[in-house]
Image (cartoon, grey):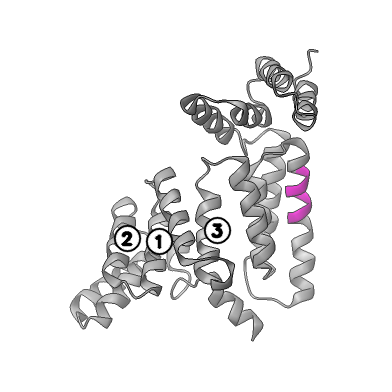
């Protein structure tokens, strides 16, 4: 009775058996014993009927989703480190599969500790993308969206998948995912940049430029947005503006200026196929 993970486990059993009130009591007891138990917050959020309390519960779970020092947070960190190696370059199928194993193992272990861990589910989706398995990636992202609808990363990555792999979904669904990620994380430059790239690929250059400028208003050194604005200016024959933006992009520090231009997932897929 005084062990928080046991209370949470009994709550999960209660959910499976349809005993919602018993489950609610068990998750509440788990949180009382350990306020940092993210899984209990997420499950209790699902049982809330009041929209405001539901939102606050999910946000509390999100704050703990990959917290360092927790069993699930440490496994997510290990998975992210392995994923960084996997995403670092183009490789053959055997090497890609070999590098994916430690990432998948760590994320799956995190889910054993916290079955609603959206960071782990999103990590599994990114691993599937790196292994050129977009349909598996979409499945993990659907699970992540169901696990915590207030995490901005799953709708953002799903929107990018739908943008870069046209067969995965309708255009309208991709646009809805971009809007959702903007609502959840309006202060993140990458959210606005990816939406801009979506509009640019639909040949809506005016909207794309506005989204890129929004990204730069949040982070003036966000290189991919400077790069795309430079290309748009050059296409519109505004050469002075294009050169100025290009020089600003080249002056960006660190990872922002590492690649010549941002590539979508679909472009990476075609390059790896070749």
Residue wearing tag 1: 195
* CB atoms of marks 3 and 1 within 8 Å: no
Residue wearing tag 2: 211
Q: Is residue 234 covered in magenta?
A: no
- Name the quadrant containing residue 209: bottom left
Per the model, the C-alpha gap separating discs 3 and 2 is 18 Å
In the rendered view, would you say 120 is above or below 127?
A: above
**Closest to the observer, 114 or 155:** 155
* CB atoms of marks 3 and 2 within 8 Å: no
Spot occupied by residue 204 in the image (x, y as percentages of width and height)? 31, 71
Look at 34% across and 56% down and name the residue there: 215
In the rendered view, would you say 244 is above or below 221?
A: below
Near mark 1 (Cα within 10 A), the count class, few <14, some 14-19 or many ≥20, is many
Question: Please, which residue is most extreme toward the bottom here?
Answer: 274
Extent of the magenta region: 103-109
Mark sitting on residue 158: 3
- Asked if residue 95 lies left or right of residue 54, the reply is right
Mark sitting on residue 273: none
Which quarter of the rendering shows the N terminus? top right
Element class at badge 1: helix
Q: Is residue 107 covered in magenta?
A: yes
- Name the quadrant containing residue 223: bottom left
Element class at badge 2: helix
Element class at badge 3: helix
Near mark 2 (Cα within 10 A), the count class, few <14, some 14-19 or many ≥20, is many
* CB atoms of marks 2 and 1 within 8 Å: yes
- Counting residues from the start of the chain, the first of labels 3 and 2 encountered is 3
**Closest to the observer, 229 or 117:** 117
Look at 29% across and 72% down and name the residue there: 205
Spot occupied by residue 226 in the image (x, y as percentages of width and height)? 33, 67
């Amino acid at each position: 009775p005084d062990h928080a993970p046991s209370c949470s486990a009994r709550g999960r059993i209660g959910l499976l058996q349809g005993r919602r009130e018993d489950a609610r009591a068990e998750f509440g007891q788990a949180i009382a014993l350990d306020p940092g138990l993210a899984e209990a917050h997420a499950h209790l959020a699902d049982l809330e009927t009041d929209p405001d309390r539901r939102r606050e519960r999910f946000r509390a779970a999100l704050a703990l989703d990959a917290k360092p020092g927790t069993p699930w947070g440490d496994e997510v960190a290990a998975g992210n480190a392995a994923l960084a190696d996997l995403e670092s370059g183009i490789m053959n199928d055997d090497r890609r599969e070999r590098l994916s194993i430690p990432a998948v193992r760590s994320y799956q272990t995190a889910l054993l500790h916290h079955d609603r861990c959206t960071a782990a589910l999103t990590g599994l989706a990114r691993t599937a993308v790196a292994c050129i398995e977009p349909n598996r990636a979409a499945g993990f992202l659907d699970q992540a969206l169901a696990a915590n609808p207030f995490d901005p990363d799953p709708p953002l990555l799903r929107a990018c998948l739908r943008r870069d792999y046209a067969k995965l979904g309708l255009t309208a669904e991709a646009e809805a995912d971009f809007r959702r990620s903007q609502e959840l994380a309006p202060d993140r430059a990458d959210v606005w940049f990816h939406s801009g790239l979506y509009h640019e690929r639909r040949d809506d250059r005016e909207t794309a430029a506005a989204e890129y400028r929004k990204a730069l208003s949040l982070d003036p050194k966000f290189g991919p947005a400077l790069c795309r604005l430079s290309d748009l200016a050059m296409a519109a024959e505004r050469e002075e503006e294009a050169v100025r933006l290009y020089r600003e992009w080249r002056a960006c520090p660190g990872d922002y200026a590492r690649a010549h231009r941002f590539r979508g997932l679909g472009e990476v897929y075609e390059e790896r196929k070749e």
